């Protein structure tokens, strides 16, 4: 959660001179994003009336070849009326530009994109009405992006297995002595249980509360689509469920939030019986996905990195909860 | 340059409910400040027309008892028309509030202040007209705060000596083998050379380019008054000179910026002959102040701290430049 690259006012002014957004008025590096740097920019605007934008510089983890998928998706969803920020295109029509890193001007250039600023705040402890709105917004993007292009899920089942294997039994045990058995048991279970043939399309795949902006009970923005991919819609709902319906680091399930989220989703897009039946295993999988990435990051993030490490055990608790209670809570 | 404390939207909404600023619309942690955390807040505003503020949480280094001096100074200067952000008072009239740290709710509370947001960007490589405006703005605060209360300079001569002594010869030598001799020679020189009896009053004492917001050639904001103190006005000008008139990490003096800065200052407040004569030694002292704090921080900042270490040698070069050329460049 940091700004990894220093861009001066002069660098920023040069950059925005390629866009039809007016002159730079203010620029603040913002503490958002783990794999990218972000600035909140204010300009005089296209028509002099003032405008705000988020400038994102892609620092790690993102393949440049994926950028057109992510940024084009924002454009499509914004056009269809979903609460997502549109991409601002430069005067040549490009969704992103390459600029030098001032600290290493002869090194590789970095990709940047200018994105619409949306109001709203991220909620830590949602109310049921807010969870309902989030479920509805998620279903909204599932329907709106149905004809969009495909991108396979780089964080699917096979990736969990790989990440866990890279952690190794010994590494996992340094996080928690019980962790190796828990994850290997869980992973072997998915092989037989994982469903096939469910409705699929573009998923956000990472719709945590900090990726949702709200104004009161209304969703004003869904952001950070950099894990977006083609997968089962119900899996995306399961990820969102795991991300929203627990308190106290996964120790406390919040049934009223769960009900509201599911009802909100189904108020826009009805789940099929097969999707309903698959939710318990999909939710276990969703929890496993974050156990795997968090365990990997826990063991591989240098102590001096500018990010806060997240405890994989928060999602082990969710996975165990879904194992025990999934059938009951997802019974329609 | 990070946000050290996580405040949720709920925490922020609770906090601003004590101010007459409307409802929270947006909140972004911003990557500014080394000893405090900052958020850019947008609210519906007093009259519903929208308003923006900087929320500052004081994390380290600042004595709570100094806050009234710093925040009252902003109010005075803003009232007198200087381009500084006014402090927003809460409904009881207080300039700051104490709030719990959500990560340690039973621990000590932290002080926060809500401050006016000002437009403008910080310039990396100033033009002469910009340096002229900065000089004039600095003189403006010197005149405007003449009757304000006093605060002794905690970063004066005695402090440099203490910081350097804490670094120790061996520590300094790990930064650069020549550093111990350079700083001890310099420090012993100040004892006899430091002037007395110059005009004094409230100084910013840290007016680096990142503490100045500009819109084109105009100064739109002087910010970060947390080193403000009573000292010689000419010393404050010398600090500003050392901060603005060099490029390439202190290797390249920019005479046109120096001339513009001094002329800008004198366009608002004429220097006395004694101040003129003292500028060379004050500039050496100003450079020494940043050698001392940077050397101390270099040796005492943990590797995993969320701050970028700054090279003390950048200011050793300035100090040596002032030693050799100070008389010539400050000759009126």
Image (cartoon, coloured by chain):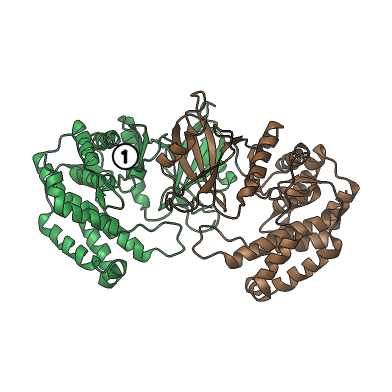
Chain colours: A brown, B green
Residue A298 in the image: state x and y as whole percent: 60, 65
Q: Is residue B72 left or right of residue A142?
A: left
On screen, A193 above or below B169?
above
Name the residue located 77 percent from the left edge and 64 percent from the top edge: A320
Q: Is residue B312 above or below residue B242?
A: below
Quarter-of-image position of residue B155: bottom left
Visible residue check, residue B90: no
Residue B180 point in image, percent of width and height: 23, 67
Residue B160 vs residue B147, the one in the foreground: B160
Query: In the rendered image, is residue B257 in sight?
Result: yes
Q: Is residue B105 above or below residue B197?
A: below
* Direction from residue A141 to residue B23 in the image, left or right: left
- SS at circle 1: loop
Chain of the residue where label 1 is placed in the rendered structure: B
Quadrant hosting residue B116: top left
- What residue is at 26 percent from the left and 53 percent from the top? B251
Say which quadrant the C terminus of chain B sits in: top left
Number of marks in the image?
1
Residue B96, horizontal then vertical, whole percent: 42, 43
Q: Residues within 10 Å of mark 1 (few under 14, many from 20)?
A: some
Q: Residue furthest right?
A: A273
Whole-percent x and y of residue B46? 50, 29
Residue at image position (57%, 41%) is A96
Q: Which residue does the numbered mark 1 point to in the structure image?
A: B126
- Decide which of B163, A202 is in the foreground and name it: A202
């Amino acid at each position: 959660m940091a700004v990894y690259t220093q861009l001066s006012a002069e660098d920023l002014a040069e950059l925005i001179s390629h866009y039809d957004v007016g002159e730079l008025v203010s620029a603040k590096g913002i503490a958002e994003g783990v794999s990218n740097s972000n600035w909140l920019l204010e300009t005089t605007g296209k028509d002099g009336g003032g405008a705000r934008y988020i400038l994102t510089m892609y620092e790690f983890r993102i393949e440049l070849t994926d950028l057109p998928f992510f940024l084009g998706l924002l454009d499509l969803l914004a056009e269809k009326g979903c609460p997502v920020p549109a991409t601002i295109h430069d005067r040549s029509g490009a969704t992103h530009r390459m600029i030098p890193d001032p600290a290493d001007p002869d090194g590789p250039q970095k990709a940047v994109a200018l994105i619409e600023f949306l109001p709203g705040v991220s909620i830590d402890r949602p109310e049921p009405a807010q969870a309902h709105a989030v479920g509805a917004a998620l279903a909204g993007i599932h329907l709106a992006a149905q004809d969009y292009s495909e991108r396979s899920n780089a964080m699917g089942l096979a990736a969990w297995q790989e990440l866990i294997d890279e952690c190794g039994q010994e590494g996992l045990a340094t996080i928690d002595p019980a962790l190796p058995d828990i994850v290997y048991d869980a992973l072997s279970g998915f092989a037989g249980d994982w469903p096939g043939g469910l409705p699929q399309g573009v998923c956000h795949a990472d719709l945590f509360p900090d990726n949702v902006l709200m104004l009161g009970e209304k969703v004003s923005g869904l952001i950070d689509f950099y894990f977006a991919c083609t997968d089962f819609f119900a899996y995306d709902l399961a990820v969102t469920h795991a991300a929203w319906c627990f308190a106290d680091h996964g120790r406390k399930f919040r049934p009223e939030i769960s009900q509201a989220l599911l009802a909100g989703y189904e108020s826009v897009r009805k789940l099929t019986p097969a999707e309903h039946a698959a939710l318990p295993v999909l939710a276990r999988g969703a929890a496993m996905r974050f156990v795997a990435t968090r365990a990997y990051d826990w063991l591989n993030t240098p102590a001096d990195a500018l990010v806060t490490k997240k405890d994989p055990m928060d999602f082990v608790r969710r996975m165990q909860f879904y194992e025990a209670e999934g059938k009951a809570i997802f019974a329609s």
